[in-house]
Image: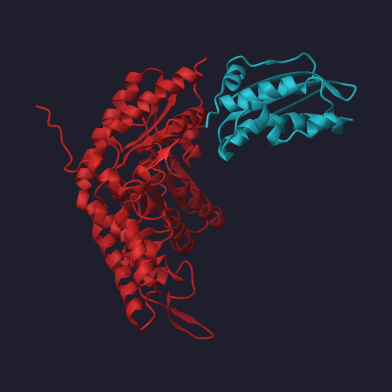
Chain colours: A red, B cyan
Amino acid sequence: MLLVMQPMFDPIKIKPDFPTLRRKVNGKELVYLDSTATAQRPVQVIQAMDDYYNNYNASVHRGIYTISEEATDRYEKAREKIARFINARPQEVIFTRNATESLNLVAYAYGDANVTLSDSILSTQMEHHSNMVPWQELAKRKNAKLNYVMVNEEGFLKMDEFDGHLLKKPKIAAFTHASNVLGTINPVREMVKKAHEAGAVAVVDGAQSVPHMKVDVKELDCDFFAFSGHKMLGPTGIGVLYGKEGILDRMEPFLTGGSMIREVTLEYSKWADLPSKFEAGTPAIAEAIGLGAAVDYLNKLGMADVRTHEIGLTKYALEKLNGFGGMRIYGPKDAAQKEGVISFLQEGVHPHDAASLLDEQGIAVRAGHHCAHPLMMRYNVPATLRASVYVYNSKTDIDKLLEALKVVEAVLKK
Amino acid sequence: MDIYRENVLDHYKNPRNFGKMGSPDAKYYDTNPLCGDEIEIQLKISGGKVTEVMFQGQGCAISQASASILTEKLIGMGLADAMKIEKEQITDWLGTELTPSRLKCALLSLMVAKAAINEFEKKG
């Protein structure tokens, strides 16, 4: 007997929590299918940030006065929530601007100190530019060699190539947990284990996984894990770098200045303990508090249920798109092996035309290269359409997309 | 907003002056790497005027339709006047307003035509 898992929450009931989803676009109710780029934010997150600005707006870790103490308390509580969310310790959670900054922090502060001439670094063809360009730049600075694991036709990493490159004993192996284009979920736990056996430090880009599934960094055993707040119902301008305490402790800081010091004289400075050592300057206080509220929201839904909901919706969307005719779909065919991200092309229709016509019907999808030029080249396309789902999307949204794609076909087919 | 008006779709589906000519006096090819639009324009020039235009390319409807419309407008136009065509003129011809992200699709052919004329004038 086939058991169909049902999530415990109803996407249609929670949708009113997201103010932007209440608006109309071009006279039509907005159908938002671009959460892979950035998620919508619930009122709970917006209110948490408003509350800071309205009631205890002050700098953190500073004043011996009430509102600064309150700000510090909420800022650090947000860190604790996020730490629990990924099973890390609070001192292992570094606030950054986004996943991109987190990965740059590793490339500069860890990479520059540990990679030298003729060393190798390993990345993959599947990466978002944020987990590719920093390693290219590191390789350039150090005259090191950067190798890539290629992607097969079905949208999976070629694991024999991963094994092969590990024989070269790379200093760093950096790979994504889930592809922002194909949706492919990589076997990260196994990849981290193999990277460690080869003596590499394992850096995981979790920007597309943390919002959509239960992530346990201790279980994954990765050394670094990066993600962004805005893709997980939180605000823009806040991201996280998780790092194993032992490694972070041995590292020199990335940015220097205020907040990250223990002692400063005219001649020398000493660094603060973790996590402050990596948080120079006044941080994004409201944004950190907002991200804490986003974590509360996701915890209330339950990450297992979020994943169940997305598998169901992805399966539905894949079936509908496959049944449409003349659709080329990129990435894994099985919803259980991927996230709620579907890249596709409509035969004879340029994705930018399709996206413009969908927008006229109130539907927001992404058209473009998705910050993954090498992956686009892999499939020999300049761009694709990408529809992605999250907690507030329902089958109705997929049905509306399919109806609108019929209009696109009718208008543009030669 | 309704960018896919009858006129735009007509030029997209039935492009004018599409193809190659025997021995052009000037030609230029360029792409919009971010979206993959490609346009080549060939010109016959005589007495400081464009006498014939052909274009080839592939890409989105906006890029191809605006190229087709441009070729019609260029025939008989003086080179100096062609170099003065601005983006407002292109959106006028298309009969629609474009968002900034789609404007670059519409302007590729104009850029290519001006580059072809520039090459011609450099050759003297």
Which of the pair A255/A48 is nearer the observer? A48
The image quadrant that residue A96 belongs to is bottom left
The image quadrant that residue A200 belongs to is bottom left
Residue at position x 88%, y 25% in the image: B48
The image shows residue A243 at horizontal and vertical percentages of 34, 61
A280 in relation to A178, above or below: below
Q: Looking at the image, which residue sits at the far left? A: A1
The image shows residue A206 at horizontal and vertical percentages of 35, 50
The image shows residue A79 at horizontal and vertical percentages of 30, 65
Name the image quarter holding the N terminus of chain A. top left
The image shows residue A288 at horizontal and vertical percentages of 36, 63
The image quadrant that residue B59 belongs to is top right
Residue A100 showing in the rendered view:
yes
Q: Name the side, left or right, on which B59 lies relative to A27.
A: right
Residue at position x 38%, y 52% in the image: A230
Residue at position x 42%, y 35% in the image: A365
Q: Looking at the image, which residue sits at the far front? A: A27
Residue A200 showing in the rendered view:
no
Count of picture labels: 0
